[in-house]
């Protein structure tokens, strides 16, 4: 295989390796990823070196790639996504002809950028195993290509057999891990948008920016940890999914195809740690539950169960409550932020309905007709709400890939044209349909469900973000969720048996705690504990220092006495695998009748065996030469595979001749 073809295949294989996380994290959409994968498969399977595209074609494709990236959303989904999509398209153009020396480094740099994008957008614990495998592959490829480059001229296009030693590759991986772990623990923490969080305030689901989950992030494609929730004194099997419906915002103003909170006054609630603040005046104290929540992601909002009646913040953070019930904290609040909430599990605490809860956008006649068609002639508000909820669940399809036209009302487009969408479309449609029947309704956004952490609590991630409906029926607020079952997040249980499930949950909990959410606070705490341990052990410093000094003195004295003593003659060499292979050949030749005397030298044996079996002359001469060079001249021993090949050649040469009785038994 030529050097150009080998470089081409290694780089194409690297392209496929770095693309593994991309479809799982969603940082690169399929229209961008498919051309990259197709080109990489074509290049890696080609049996001849491919020529690079003409320069004029690359110049034409460059502006088209930029236009495609901008048309796909630009930076509205975060800076990482457009950079990643730009990188995969550029890599797809650079891969043909990447075996040429002039393109190898540039192509490798672009593939490195693609790999960083995939790793930076991954939050699953399996990322650690992927990183080890990718690092091993990269070291193997770099070592192989370095050998190809060094021997390219000498082999004149022939097959190159230079490979990096396996011990060097594995040792490099171990050293990289040992260096990376303390660096990760010591370097400053960066709260970046790399874990698939949006750059701005828009939702990645496709709804226009006015209809969004209020900046709470990538609603379905990210596994970034948002918060931890524990219900003290309650066994995990007794936790109701409704307790994990955590409200972040309640909105009721529908303006120009989007939900807005309006300009409302806010009330300062808390600023002192461990000071309970009543969220509902005169709430009964019986039947309440408590939730301990640790906010891990900066959202500017505190999430609470729907029946929250009191709030206790465990640190000095200023909390304000808007008239809509949204609990806000200042941007830049130090995280993680723990707080406790007491809530009524059977009630929804909301301000009474008003005229805004019945507002409808212009042109809602078709909405009114659809609502009457679905509910029939019923006059019961609860039955009407349930009928609309079931109609949306059964007659519309859930999908994240929706693109509502800019000049068309998104709810009208969803109900009468596309008939598919995500939770925001379903919840918004039900709110407006209920209002056409004079049933007050509001839209709520937050998180629903979670994953057990193996310690009795729950991990709530970006993927549990959700939107649902509040409707005022039978003189109280009730929760409705018109999203189909496949789009409703809930309590996620790990697969496998109890032991495996608990073990995996434990691993995920440790990964989230000590990798994804490892913060500056943890670093400071570690430093404080180290200083305290050092101060507590200061009384032992003098004895330990004296003991170490004495040990060092003894070692130095022993080495000095050894140097001053008489010099011993140095042994000439040491048995190697070449010597053992030669002894094996001598045993085989003795069984075939070659006279092997006890004082016979290796060269004498080679002459006698070559005379009896001419076919063994060349490999036997080579083996004797390598034996003398490695044992007596202290030269580097040849590779074991070369020695084994020589022994096999000698054995085949001996087996072709008829068996003869040995004159003298073999000498060990």
Image (cartoon, rainbow, N blue to C red):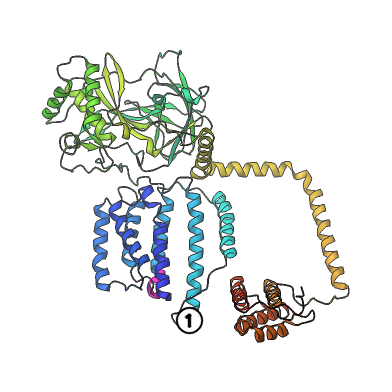
Relative placement, left or right, of 419 versus 447 is left
Q: Is residue 101 magenta?
A: yes
Residue 510 drawn at (x, y percent): 53, 40
**Quarter-of-image position of residue 372:** top left
Report the span colored magenta.
97-105
**Quarter-of-image position of residue 47:** bottom left
| Residue depicted at 81% across the width and 59% down the height | 552
Q: Nearer the viewer, residue 417 or 395?
A: 395
Q: Is residue 79 visible?
A: no
Q: Is residue 249 visible?
A: yes
| Above or below, 621 relative to 300 | below
Residue 419 drawn at (x, y percent): 19, 36
Label 1 CA crowd tier, 10 Å (few <14, some 14–19, many 20+): few
| Above or below, 285 relative to 365 | above
| Above or below, 577 relative to 529 | below
Q: Nearer the viewer, residue 619 or 537?
A: 619
Q: Is residue 25 magenta?
A: no
Q: Quadrant of the N terminus?
A: bottom left
Residue 441 drawn at (x, y percent): 25, 23
| Residue depicted at 24% across the width and 72% down the height | 56
| Residue depicted at 74% across the width and 81% down the height | 595
Query: Which residue lies under the disc numbered 1?
Result: 155
Q: Nearer the viewer, residue 389 or 348?
A: 389
């Amino acid at each position: 295989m030529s050097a150009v073809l080998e470089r081409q295949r290694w780089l194409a294989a690297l392209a496929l390796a770095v693309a593994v996380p991309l479809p799982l994290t969603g940082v690169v959409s399929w229209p961008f990823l498919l051309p990259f994968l197709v080109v990489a498969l074509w290049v890696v399977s080609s049996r001849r070196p491919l020529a690079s595209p003409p320069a004029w074609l690359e110049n034409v494709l460059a502006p088209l790639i930029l236009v495609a990236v901008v048309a796909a959303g630009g930076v509205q989904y975060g800076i990482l996504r457009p950079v990643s999509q730009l990188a995969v398209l550029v890599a797809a153009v650079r891969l043909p002809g990447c075996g040429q020396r002039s393109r190898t480094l540039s192509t490798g740099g672009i593939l490195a950028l693609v790999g960083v994008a995939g790793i930076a957008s991954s939050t699953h614990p399996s990322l650690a195993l992927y990183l080890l495998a990718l690092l091993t592959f990269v070291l193997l490829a770099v070592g192989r290509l370095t050998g190809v480059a060094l021997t390219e001229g000498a082999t004149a296009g022939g097959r190159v057999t230079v490979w990096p030693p396996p011990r060097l590759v594995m040792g490099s991986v171990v050293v990289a891990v040992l260096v990376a772990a303390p660096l990760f623990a010591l370097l400053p923490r960066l709260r970046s948008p790399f874990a698939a969080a949006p750059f701005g305030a828009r939702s990645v689901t496709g709804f226009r920016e006015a209809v969004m989950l209020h900046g709470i992030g990538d609603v379905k494609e990210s596994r970034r940890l948002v918060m931890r929730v524990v219900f003290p004194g309650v066994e995990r099997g007794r936790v109701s999914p409704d307790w994990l419906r955590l409200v972040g915002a309640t909105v009721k103003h529908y303006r120009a195809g989007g939900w807005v909170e309006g300009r409302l006054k806010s009330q300062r609630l808390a600023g002192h740690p461990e000071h309970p603040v009543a969220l509902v005046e005169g709430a009964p104290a019986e039947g309440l539950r408590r939730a301990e929540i640790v906010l891990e992601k900066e959202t500017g909002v505190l999430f609470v169960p729907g029946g929250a009646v009191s709030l206790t913040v465990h640190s000095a953070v200023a909390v304000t409550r808007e008239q809509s019930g949204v609990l806000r904290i200042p941007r830049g609040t130090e995280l993680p932020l723990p707080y406790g909430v007491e809530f009524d599990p059977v009630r929804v605490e909301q301000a009474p309905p008003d005229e805004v809860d019945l507002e409808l956008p212009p042109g809602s006649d078709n909405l009114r007709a659809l609502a009457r068609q679905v509910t029939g002639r019923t006059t019961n508000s609860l039955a009407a709400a349930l009928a609309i909820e079931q109609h949306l669940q059964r007659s519309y399809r859930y999908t994240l890939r929706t693109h509502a036209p800019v000049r068309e009302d998104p709810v009208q487009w969803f109900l009468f044209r596309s008939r598919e969408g995500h939770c925001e479309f379903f919840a918004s449609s039900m709110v407006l349909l209920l209002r056409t029947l004079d049933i007050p309704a509001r839209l709520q956004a937050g998180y629903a469900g979670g994953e057990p952490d193996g310690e009795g609590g729950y991990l709530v991630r970006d993927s549990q973000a959700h939107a649902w409906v509040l409707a005022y029926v039978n003189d109280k607020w009730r929760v409705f969720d018109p999203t189909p079952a496949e789009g409703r997040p809930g309590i996620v249980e790990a697969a496998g048996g109890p032991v495996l499930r608990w073990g995996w949950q434990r691993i995920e909990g440790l990964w989230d705690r000590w990798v994804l959410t490892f913060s500056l606070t943890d670093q400071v705490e570690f430093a404080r504990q180290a200083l305290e341990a050092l101060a507590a052990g200061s009384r032992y410093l003098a004895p330990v220092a004296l003991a170490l000094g004495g040990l060092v003195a003894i070692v130095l004295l022993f080495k000095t006495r050894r140097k001053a003593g008489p010099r011993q003659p140095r042994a000439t060499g040491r048995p190697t695998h070449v010597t053992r292979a030669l002894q094996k050949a001598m045993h085989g030749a003795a069984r075939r009748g070659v006279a092997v005397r006890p004082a016979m030298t290796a060269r004498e044996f080679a002459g006698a065996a070559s005379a009896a079996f001419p076919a063994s002359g060349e490999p036997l001469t080579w083996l004797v030469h390598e034996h003398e060079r490695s044992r007596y001249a202290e030269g580097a021993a040849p590779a074991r595979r070369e020695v084994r090949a020589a022994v096999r050649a000698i054995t085949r040469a001996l087996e072709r001749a008829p068996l003869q009785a040995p004159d003298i038994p073999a000498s060990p």
